[in-house]
Amino acid sequence: MSKDAIKQMIERMTRTSGMVDTGVKGVQIFKVTEAMPCAPAVYEPCVVAIVSGAKEAILDGQRYQYDSSQYMCCPMSMPVEAGTPTASPDNPLMGVLISLDTRVMTDLAIEMTRAHGVILHPRGGPVPQGLALARWDEGFTDALLRLLEVTDNPADTAVLGYSRLRELYYAVLKGEAGHSAQRAFGVDNEIARAIAYLASRLDEQVTIEDTAAQVGMSRAVFHRKFKQATTFSPIQFVKSMRLNNAAMKIASGTSVNEAAMNVGYVNPSQFSREFKRLYGQSPKQWSQSVQPMAGLV
């Protein structure tokens, strides 16, 4: 079984808790042996495949738990809460984190549309475009195994790593998360481009009108399509991204004032009010109570 072989490879490569680089750019394996409650995080475009244990993510109040039966695809930067509710030394969380390269994913999505006119539709009901769970189908499982196999040999990694990673991207685009991924990286990717624009300017005062103009939409149409794709309004998205980034910085040891300034807050009182409204604690209380961040998505 390909999935069993993947699990055995990860067990061999993760002797201790933490992240391990595979040698293929953007591909890491991980092991977590401690249960952690959900805490603010920012998911960058990625795929997370679990082979042991379970991972939890909350997007705008909607809770997603995924394990070895489904992989998670996040095609756009998203403010979430994430945790490892069941991890323990006897039942560790283990898996693979694959960052999604925007250029490669876009090229593949456009090639698929040109070659076959592929239009993928979500299965099993509506799923927010910003976060999708997908079954480990045969194409994804085989592609992931082939990708990890090249990491055993540095020469194979250097020569074949990129092509195997591209093969995995293609399997994602063809799988159950393909609709979300194609919408983010294909020709109809205005909202994904708007999210990238906003996420790279969290420390600036960017208006919704400016962002809508960047993707050629009116304010009303942009607002409607943005909420359909992410469940957030544009203003809610920016606020959540800022506060989640600030919370992560504080958890990593950054002072409250510096964290606030780094994400665009010039008024400390406003930052404290909005932080407490979202997390139920003041920034100072949060800094004293939060567990050290594990550095895992």
Image (tube, grey):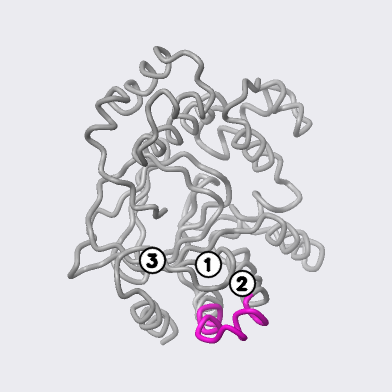
Marks 1/2: CA distance? 9 Å
Q: Earlier in the sequence, mark 2 or mark 3?
A: 3
Where residue 93 appears, x then y in whole percent? 30, 65
Q: Which mark is residue 165?
A: 2
Marks 2/3: CA distance? 18 Å
The amino acid type of the residue labelled 2 equals Leu
Where residue 292 appears, x then y in whole percent? 29, 46
Q: Is residue 180 above or below residue 256?
A: below
The quadrant holding residue 105 is bottom right
Image-based side of 124 in relation to 169, left or right: left
Where residue 274 appears, x then y in whole percent? 39, 19
Image-based side of 184 in relation to 62, left or right: right
Q: Which mark is residue 142?
A: none
Residue hosting label 1: 27
Instruction: Give the main secondary structure, helix, strand or loop, of the magenta stretch.
Output: helix
Tell me which segment is drawn in magenta.
Answer: 146-161
Q: Quadrant of the N terminus?
A: bottom left
Image-based side of 137 in relation to 30, left or right: right
Q: Are marks 1 and 2 in contact (CB under 8 Å)?
A: yes
- Judge by depth and name the residue closer to the eye, 226 or 150: 150
Q: Residue at x 52, y 31 (%)?
A: 237
Q: Which mark is residue 30?
A: 3
Q: Is residue 262 above or below residue 178?
A: above
**View extreme (left): residue:** 90
Marks 3/1: CA distance? 10 Å
The amino acid type of the residue labelled 1 equals Val
- Judge by depth and name the residue closer to the eye, 118 or 191: 191
Q: Is residue 190 above or below residue 49?
A: above
Image-based side of 44 in relation to 6, left or right: right
In magenta segment, residue 83: no
Q: Earlier in the sequence, mark 1 or mark 2?
A: 1
